[in-house]
Image (cartoon, rainbow, N blue to C red):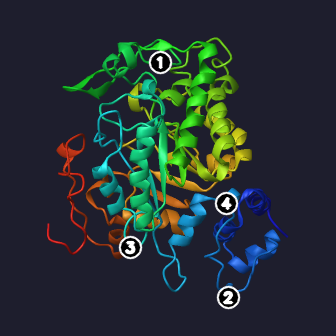
């Protein structure tokens, strides 16, 4: 006789299995077995997971089959890449979450130095199972920092093609992070020197990086209701250009107080139209963006980054954060996203700055789960082994350690980061960090 708790665990798992592509079902069963404190074989029987081999011996090609093009799921590929030559799971599944490097060429065009940087970290045997690029603006108005790359014209597509070709030559997978900063910008970065666009006309109390150094962000202009579909269309077009540039998919940046969160959070959004007020209205912009992007390139090529309780960029925590983000998850679940990338706690800061039930959010989305923010090797191992995450993202450690995946697996020492060289400049502090065993 099953207890009420066991019924609940099995019910949630069955819902996940209904939505999951074949390559991602086994981890769900393994996670269910851990929750039920039973064997994987017993969990298979209880779930009635048809089509699975519940015995210990797996089909020879069980982890190497290629998904049809219209069912491409990025994380399924990453999970396959986390197998060693004997078909055994490697202990850490890593993703590179690239921070701003501010090294794009004139015209916001990616360059050869950027291609070298990403290629250094692309081999899944030593680097990242999945690379998420630095944030990339979807339009001229989306820029908020000096020398960040864009993805809205042919020159930028050609520049990114150089990057994706270099990554794929190393056997890697790469998605571009699509970004609109909203009010986190400065008039010197905006076309014609006009005010940045946002959900609100209230400026953020934060700074950005412009020619000459850091400066207070400018006062924004609130988008008119009739202008919002045009911004949604920019996300869609950027996603289409990403595929043209050779990316394996995209990650929509919905975190850290940028434009999407400026609509989501009631501490910023002061609108009175269909995009403000209720949870449903404040979530409308993100939902429309995700529907547009997945409509263009498919849910299996589309990820989403969220940071439910980060205070980054003067983004006060929403008064109903749990309800807001679970509503978003339920609305986006039918899109069958490739992954959801969640920053736990305050971005780059404490992980416990505010209470939030991330497990409940994961259930709402029912998608492969990538976690981020201050993960150590031990935490990453525990997260993957317990089924708490499918992938663990690392930011700064990957900058200073191009072979971070290998170092984590071997518990090897890490290179020390040189923070003064993070933003702008050339190869120093970017592509000159040594690999394990190489002379410093």
Q: Identify the residue under disc 1.
A: 197
- The answer for how far apart the CA atoms under marks 1 and 2 are is 56 Å
Pair 4/3: label in front: 4
Whichever of callouts 1 and 2 sits on the residue coming sooner in the sequence is 2
Is disc 4 surrounded by few (<14), some (14 to 19) or many (20+) residues within 10 Å?
A: few
Residue 166 spot, x, y in % from top left = 39, 60
Q: Identify the residue under disc 3.
A: 409
Outermost residue, left direction? Answer: 440
Is there any visible trace of residue 386 in the rendered image? no
- The answer for how far apart the CA atoms under marks 4 and 2 are is 28 Å
Is disc 1 surrounded by few (<14), some (14 to 19) or many (20+) residues within 10 Å?
A: many
Residue 344 spot, x, y in % from top left = 48, 46
Secondary structure of the residue carrying numbered label 2 = loop
Is there any visible trace of residue 300 in the rendered image? yes
Q: Identify the residue under disc 4.
A: 69
For the C terminus, which image quadrant? bottom left
């Amino acid at each position: 006789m099953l207890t009420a708790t066991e019924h609940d665990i099995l019910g949630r798992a069955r819902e996940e299995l209904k939505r999951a592509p074949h390559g991602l079902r086994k981890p769900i069963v393994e996670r269910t077995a851990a929750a039920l404190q039973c064997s994987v074989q017993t969990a298979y029987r209880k779930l009635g997971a048809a089509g699975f081999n519940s015995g210990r011996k797996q089909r020879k090609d069980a982890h190497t089959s290629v998904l049809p093009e219209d069912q491409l799921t990025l994380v399924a590929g990453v999970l396959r890449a986390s197998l060693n030559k004997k078909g055994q799971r490697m202990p850490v599944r890593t993703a590179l979450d690239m921070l701003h490097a501010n090294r794009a060429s004139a015209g916001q065009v990616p360059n050869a130095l950027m291609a070298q940087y990403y290629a250094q970290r692309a081999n899944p045997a030593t680097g990242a199972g999945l690379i998420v690029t630095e944030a990339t603006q979807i339009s001229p108005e989306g820029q908020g920092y000096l020398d960040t790359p864009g993805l809205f014209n042919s020159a930028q597509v050609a520049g990114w093609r150089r990057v994706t070709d270099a990554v794929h030559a190393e056997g890697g997978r790469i998605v571009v992070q699509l970004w609109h900063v909203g009010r986190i910008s400065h008039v010197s970065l905006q076309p014609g020197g006009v005010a940045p666009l946002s959900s609100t006309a209230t400026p953020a109390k934060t700074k950005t990086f412009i020619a000459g150094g850091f400066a207070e962000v400018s006062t924004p202009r609130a988008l008119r209701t009739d202008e919002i579909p045009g911004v949604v269309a920019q996300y869609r077009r950027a996603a289409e250009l990403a595929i043209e540039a050779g990316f394996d998919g995209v990650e929509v940046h919905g975190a850290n107080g940028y434009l999407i969160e400026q609509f989501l959070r009631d501490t910023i959004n002061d609108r009175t139209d269909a995009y403000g007020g209720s949870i449903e209205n404040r979530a409308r912009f993100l939902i429309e963006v995700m529907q547009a992007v997945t409509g263009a390139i498919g849910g299996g090529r589309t990820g989403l980054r969220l940071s439910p309780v980060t205070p980054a960029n003067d983004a006060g925590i929403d008064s109903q954060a749990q309800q807001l983000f679970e509503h978003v998850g339920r609305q986006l679940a039918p899109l069958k996203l490739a992954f959801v990338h969640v920053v736990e706690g305050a971005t780059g800061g404490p992980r416990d700055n505010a209470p939030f039930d991330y497990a409940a959010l994961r259930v709402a989305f029912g998608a492969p789960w990538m976690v981020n923010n201050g993960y150590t090797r031990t935490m990453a191992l525990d997260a993957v082994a317990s089924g708490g995450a499918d992938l663990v993202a690392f930011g700064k450690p990957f900058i200073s350690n191009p072979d971070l995946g290998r170092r984590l697996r071997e518990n090897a020492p890490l290179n020390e980061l040189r923070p003064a060289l993070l933003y702008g400049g050339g190869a120093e502090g970017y592509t000159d960090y040594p690999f394990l065993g190489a002379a410093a």
